[in-house]
Image (tube, helix red, strand yellow):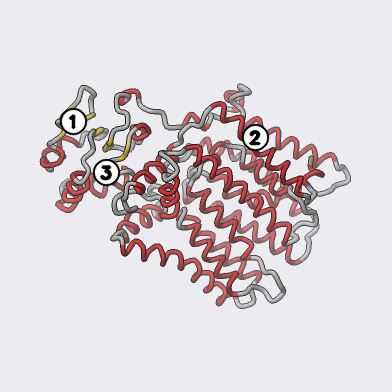
Amino acid sequence: MLQFFKSALLTRLFVLLLLLLALRLPLLWWGLPLMPAELREMLIGERLQAGGYLYRDLYDSTAPLAAALAGLLELVGSRPLWLYRLLALVLLTFQALRFNFVLNRADVHPERGYVAALVYLLIGSLSTDLDILSPLLLGHTFLIAGFSALLPTSREGYDNRRLFRAGFLIGVAALCYLPLALFLLLALFAVLIFAANSFRSFLLLVCGFLFPYAVVGTFFLYTDSLPGFAQFHLRPTLSGLVAGADGLPLAVQLRLLLLPGVVLLAGLVRSFVLPPGLVFQVKFQQLMLVWLLVAGLMAAAGRGVAPGTLVLALPPLTYFSLYLWQKTQRAWIPELALLALTGAVLVVRYRSALFLENVLQLPLESHYAVRPNPRYAFLQGQHLLVLGPDMRPYAQNQLATPYLDWQLAQADFGHLNRYDAIFRLARNVQSDPPRYLIDQRGLVPELQYKIPGVFGRYEATNTKGVYRLKGE
């Protein structure tokens, strides 16, 4: 198997894609559980498709380009979950093939082929967490696309266009998931070890990074959304308020990272034991170590639970794992190791079908999917306002107000003793009054007292905490 993928023939690429589909498609028989991150993206897409503007008509911290993509996907159909999953698969495959191409072109290892892409896709298929079209997965794709621009193509070093392009793509990645801006540290290190004029080169990187932000800032300025961009995206994300709020629990994430961690550790040990290669190969190894460090900082920024966290470790893991597959006196050892890795991925991926969930002490990701609350089963296809953090009622209904993220909604609901908050609440709810209110925090009595012209129009239903617009 290993020798087969060490060839650069296109037939290997075809077999690699077939193997990827064989790993993922059988899970379709069990259905596609709707994860919290996907529900959030779909609600954002619906709101944008209805003519709303991000950060002005929607209180959410999702980055601009990730939200824009959700709006575009709504053009295909209402909440196209299959399209989200298909696009996530395409992006992960592109990352694997692009990173494999960079390694081969740069002669990082003496052996070429599709082994790097194979390992990338194998580890990427370990968990269904990477089946989700998360902002992190989307932004990481732009990082992989721009990674080759950080590597010089001649002894003279970089040219200006490549450096600007690298900074630009890092900026685009940050517009998908803001903490990805930390990869400017990786770009700075690449400039330090590869470029002759480090300061000038880094300025080009920074200019490229700021350019997409200047374009997006101009758009928000003309749509009167620039203050909201700072209030609901920049400040909350930088303070860690909402990063990773829709991901798997930390304990589950750490268990899923156990197998990749073993592969990475084994590759690191072997890379330090083997004799050093050429000067460029040593520098590239250092660059991958810095990538690993930045990935750790990124994981900490998302508190380790951001959807798609595993994708951050895939490039350095893939690179260092190549040391495990090099030729040895006992050629059967690397072959057996790769087969063992493939088997381990299959066991973790299909632990439910193999009845190994309890044996591995690893809960299924589907246990954390969005499950409609039976208490609100009578609400189907309604326009709602949920006063609380539980977004499950939106799974079968639509968002009627800007208040999607409850933490960010505290800018208004958390200051009911201030006139400006009362004014914004009345304006945002009155413009398109929801048909039902679901009060998870017991706020309706106070709202009816302070804003009777808006919330006084709602009456209690037979279900506790649910209010209906009178006359509906």
- Image coordinates for residue 232, horizontal then vertical, percent: 33, 53
- Quick one: which residue is furthest to the front in this view? 76
Q: Is residue 374 left or right of residue 180?
A: left
User: What is the distance, in whole Å, between disc 3 and disc 1 at their CAs?
Assistant: 18 Å
Give the mark toward the camera: 3 or 1: 1
Identify residue type, mark 2: Leu
Image vertical order of residue 349 relative to residue 204, above or below? above
When asked about the image quadrant of residue 119, the answer is top right
Point 12% across, 37% down: residue: 456
Tag 1's secondary structure? loop
Give the residue number, with chain letter if any, for mark 2.
23
Point 18% across, 44% down: residue: 430
Q: In the rendered structure, which disc, 3 or 1, sits on the residue that comes first in sequence?
A: 3
- Image coordinates for residue 290, horizontal then vertical, percent: 61, 59
Identify residue type, mark 3: Thr
Residue 472: numbered disc: 1
Q: Estimate how packed mark 1 is, as few (under 14), some (14 to 19) or many (20 or more) residues with alpha carbons within 10 Å.
A: few
User: What is the distance, in whole Å, between disc 1 and disc 2 at their CAs?
Assistant: 49 Å
Image vertical order of residue 319 relative to residue 196, above or below? above
Identify residue type, mark 1: Glu
Give the mark toward the camera: 1 or 2: 1
User: What is the distance, in whole Å, between disc 2 and disc 3 at their CAs?
Assistant: 41 Å
